[in-house]
Image (spheres, rainbow, N blue to C red):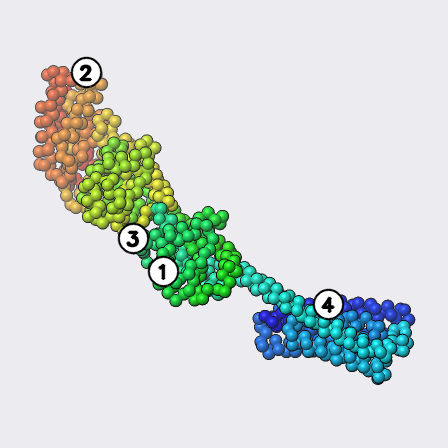
Amino acid sequence: MATEFLFKQAARLCKVRWAVLLFATLLALLSVSLGASLDLFHIYLRLITLTAVTNIISTLAYEHYKNHASTYTPKKIAVLQWWTYFQTLADLLLLTAGIHYTGGIHSPGIYLLLIYIAGMAITYGTVLPVAIFTAISMVLFTGLFIAYKHHLLTPIGIFSSPADNLPPSASFTVTIIAVDGLLLTMAGITLAQSHRLRKLWEESEAQRAFFASLHQLSRHGLQYHDLYQTVRFLSQRLQTLLNADEVFTILWEERGGQLSPLATYNIHDNLQHRTLSTQERQAFHKNCQRLLQRLESLHPFWIHLNNPHPSLPPALQQRLQEHQSLLLFPIHTPGRQTLIGVVSLAFHQTPSDPTMYTQRAQRALEVIAPLFARTVTLHQISAHLTLLQELANDVTGLTQNLNLHHLAPAITENAARLLNATTAIFIPYTNAPIAQYLKTWHTAGLDPFLAQECYKHQNVCQRLLRDEIFLQLALPEDCALLPPALQEACQAHRFHLLAFFAIPSPRAPLGLLILLWQNKRQLLTPHEIAVGKLFAARAGAALYNAYLYHLLRKEARTDALTGLPNRRAVDEALEQEWKRAQRYHHPFSIVMLDLNHFKRINDQFGHQKGDVALQHAAALLKQNLRETDFVGRYGGDEFLIILPESTREDAHIVMHKVTEAAARAPWDFLAPDFHLTLSYGIATYPDDGTEVYALVDIADRRLYENKPAE
């Protein structure tokens, strides 16, 4: 620091020297124009040139040091320091010569010498070099005037004779004493002020270096994006910058009304590699609440560590057993709106001026706190973006699925994965339009008993939500809100958190999505809740779209009059059964059936009664066929029946039962004594053929062979 101050002041002196040389050059030119001799002018030019040469070397040397100070070895610094001494000595010699050639006692160089001694004292700022060079200047000046007194030298004047420049004999001693006294006084006064100037300069340089380090720290800190790397980097640099013995950093976030550790430095070194237990998180929240009470004013404060302090986490107290004091700083978001953590500086010995140190540290934290807040924000945004990306992927998969029976399990699996739940349940409301198609609940990795309890108490769960679309329950604290059987089931499976999401739709809520967590975690964050609500909304839309698609598909495959599958559905069923029979080598039978004398019914009773007769016939067929059998309206009064894995004999038995039921059935809506009969024809695979439509033709031909005459 001392040599740096010396070289900076010497560089400034070089600039002053250039100004003096310019002024001296102008005076020399002026003297020639006013009649001074050319010989004297040449002497002035030599003195000016010699001074300029040395000043050029000094200027270049100090400029090089300024640009490459970090590469200078002690040997180079010593050489430059000796050059400074040489430059000062050369200046004193040149000033003495200048006094001699500009009039001696009448020379303005005497005043310039006094000014130079003041500048020299400011430059060096220490007693020894100032005393040495002041003594040299006194010796040179005294020697010059003694030489004048003994006529060894004669002062040269510009426009006067040498005799005019000699003072009276008695004045030599007075002049020497006066000038030497002024030199000593000027050097002493300036040196005293130089100490103060140098102290101010050192403080200024320290501040400049401090703020330069802060700027560099801020610039490098902006290059980090990973939360843990940023916390480690900023904490380590802060420890170096503020000369603290240790630094402890804690960053937290609010999750479900509690403070949860986000990142730490020097406390839980492996926090990012493990999950804290519920007890650890609760203890962390409790300790952070104590810290928050102390940090309400958002100002730093000192803690003396003579005794354990109740507001410090136990893990931190263990690390502070050999320290004397601790300085705590709050880390807050820009605008001082929210506290997100605390930085603690630990000291084996308390700084000599705690107030000054606190101010300096506070400046550093004002720069670093936004970097902490930035990396926390980036970390949270990254987590939220990841969650939203997963939501987008899951929703895309749901919207592409129009199968109700595949969609409900997909919703539970995606919801559990999206929010890291242990399992999930989807329960359709009994009054929802999809309930008739999804009569069972869909679970992902859950005991059927607990799923059954949730299904059984869906009304209770629905009442818990009331007008809300989301509710979360922490167990066992909120157990009282659940039915006893459901409480016992949750406790038996060690669930610690339940979340209920209503599944909305454009018409009415479709059902309930229940997520359960076995791991000991805190409540869902607001962002997780928002993502869960979005997922539930999109799941409801996907379910409703699948429901509409199911209705449209059903209508497209269903005969409007009888409610039986129509001709398209019949063709699809024939194709499927034929392929299955070919694969497994099973027989199956096709039956073509129609109503006898159906034209007479239409003619006698009207077409509306004929339609009713067809409806009754369709209902009779559905009631008397097996569950595995298929019946559809083929056209007009014809019906096609598929009997899987049935031979011709099996088919005759089934159809005999159907025709007997038709003969016994009342048809009094037509006439009191009216009895409807049926005719049918059977074709069996592979006995009657191996091509499906050839079998249909055979069954149709046999039907007409068996019909009674009109």
Q: Foreground mark, 2 or 4?
A: 4
Position of 292 compared to 497: left or right? Answer: right
Task: Mark 1: give few (<14), some (14-19) or many (20+) Cα within 10 Å.
Answer: some
**Which mark, by number, is residue 16?**
4
Residue denoted by label 2 = 605
Distance from the alpha carbon under mark 1 to that under mark 2: 103 Å
Q: Amino acid at mark 2?
A: Phe
Do the residues under discs 3 and 4 have CB atoms within 8 angstroms?
no
In what element is the residue under mark 2? helix
Distance from the alpha carbon under mark 3 to that under mark 1: 25 Å
Do the residues under discs 1 and 4 have CB atoms within 8 angstroms?
no
Task: Mark 3: give few (<14), some (14-19) or many (20+) Cα within 10 Å.
Answer: few
Position of 569 compared to 193: left or right? Answer: left
**Which mark, by number, is residue 278?**
3
Distance from the alpha carbon under mark 3 to that under mark 4: 72 Å
- Sequence-wise, the earlier of marks 3 and 1 is 3
Distance from the alpha carbon under mark 1 to that under mark 4: 61 Å
Q: Amino acid at mark 3?
A: Thr
Residue at 35%, 43% (x, y): give it.
Answer: 529
Position of 680 compared to 527: left or right? Answer: left
Residue at 45%, 54% (x, y): give it.
Answer: 330
Viewer-side residue, 454 vs 350: 350
- Sequence-wise, the earlier of marks 2 and 3 is 3
Distance from the alpha carbon under mark 2 to that under mark 3: 80 Å
Residue denoted by label 1 = 308
| Residue 293 location (% of width, % of height) | 40, 50
In what element is the residue under mark 3? helix
| Residue 611 location (% of width, % of height) | 21, 21
